[in-house]
Image: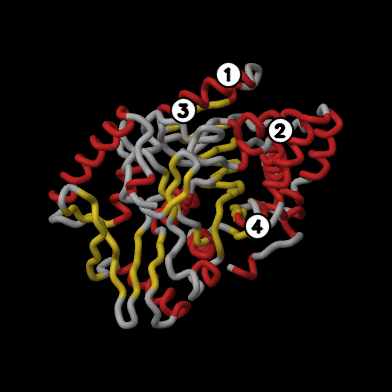
Amino acid sequence: MDKSTLAAADPAAQQHSDKLKQLITELISEQGGWLSFADFMQRCLYQPGLGYYSAGSHKLGQGGDFTTAPETSSLFGQALATHIADAGKQLEDFDVLEFGAGSGRLAVTVLEQLSRIDCLPRRYLILETSADLQQRQQQLIAESLPSLSSRVAWLSAIPERFTGVILANEVADAMPLHLLTFTENDVSEQGVSVDNDQFVWQKRPLQNSRLQNKARQIRACIGEQPYQTEVNLAAEDWLTTVADKLQQGAVFIVDYGYAFEEYYRPDRSLGTLRCYYRQQAHDNPLLLPGLQDITAHVDFSSLAHSAHAAGLDVDGFHEQADFLLAGDITQLSAELEQQSKTLDWLKHSSNLKQLLLPGAMGHQFKILTLSRDMGVFPRLQAADRRYQL
């Protein structure tokens, strides 16, 4: 999709984007004319007051740029709550910590369901970098859960010592990532430069030792063909930090992605980098800085290896459909059908298919379950795909 078919929705939005563009242009100049794509993506998404997740644009659901599973159906959060309860029952007292809570819809649904099954956490903590989203979360939770809102608190950093359940729903895919470009005999890192007041791609030799190691592993999968792909070191570092803070409990990472060998298949030669703007998907992250989401699929093998190296147990790796079925989503949907009018149930049924069908979210999304000092999770034994990691 080129510039002629993708434009800012209004002059104010364009002005916002131009302001961020100028800031990044100055940064590129300060860095000698080249900025790694990871640093570029960091600014586009998280620059205070200007980045996509730091400013006040409407991102989620109808009229936004993309739709997540919690926005699609409350059954997602209810089934996830079943797994949270399994972990919570193994702990004398526990908290829930959600990274990047979006609209707050998942928090509302999980708390409602945990209350219903008498397994409420002591606190529901939210770590949210966006002041705008935090305000929306606070409003939704206050309106939807007045009796439980006192249990919810917002944090600016992960606690030094945490016991309980950690949730990361579509978090890792939005962490800044590096782009690697392979030729027959060489590999380089793709970065961003400026030419005629426009952002342009520019490669440079690979210098980071961690990226060099990843490149050797990827080369073993792809051979000597031309290839471009992503490496998400930030997600590995984040998970190492989470492991360091987790004293006891479980971690559920929900995202679209693959195990390593599937991620770096020879025929996936253009990578998985995608951008989303007003429900349009395209592959040019250099356009409209600050106005569009930038994302890529998650390499779950690398996350699992990072978790294991940090002392966590890898308890399960599931496709979303299998994980939700293990969380009793069919029983929950039957109860919802009994409570719903016919037309309402038709909508719920359609959304349920989105969550479960292979051609929709059911196969594309995966759940990686990690833990420290916990017992067996019986529900996770069925359809476990850890052998792929």
Query: Which residue type carries mark 1?
Result: Ala
Q: Nearer the viewer, residue 166 or 63?
A: 63
Is the C-beta separation of discs 2 and 1 under 8 Å?
A: no
Q: Residue at x 74, y 60 (%)?
A: 381
Residue at the right extreme? 338
Task: Please tell me whether mark 4 or mark 1 is closer to you in this view.
Answer: 4
What is the tally of numbered marks visible in this picture? 4
Query: Which residue type carries mark 4?
Result: His
- Observer able to see residue 141: yes
Q: Residue at x 50, y 62 (%)?
A: 299
User: Neighbour class for label 2 at 10 Å: few (<14), some, many (≥20)?
Assistant: some
- Observer able to see residue 88: no
Image-quadrant location for residue 18:
top left
Q: Is residue 116 above or below residue 192?
A: above
User: Neighbour class for label 1 at 10 Å: few (<14), some, many (≥20)?
Assistant: some
Kindly report the distance in space between the C-alpha atoms of the residues bearing marks 3 and 1. Answer: 12 Å
> Residue beneath label 4, please?
363
> Residue beneath label 2, please?
114
Kindly report the distance in space between the C-alpha atoms of the residues bearing marks 4 and 1. Answer: 34 Å
Q: Earlier in the sequence, mark 2 or mark 1?
A: 2
Is the C-beta separation of discs 3 and 4 under 8 Å?
A: no
Is the C-beta separation of discs 2 and 4 under 8 Å?
A: no
> Residue beneath label 1, please?
142
Kindly report the distance in space between the C-alpha atoms of the residues bearing marks 3 and 4. Answer: 30 Å
Q: Earlier in the sequence, mark 2 or mark 4?
A: 2
Q: Which mark is residue 134?
A: 3
Q: Quadrant of the C terminus?
A: bottom right
Kindly report the distance in space between the C-alpha atoms of the residues bearing marks 2 and 4. Answer: 26 Å
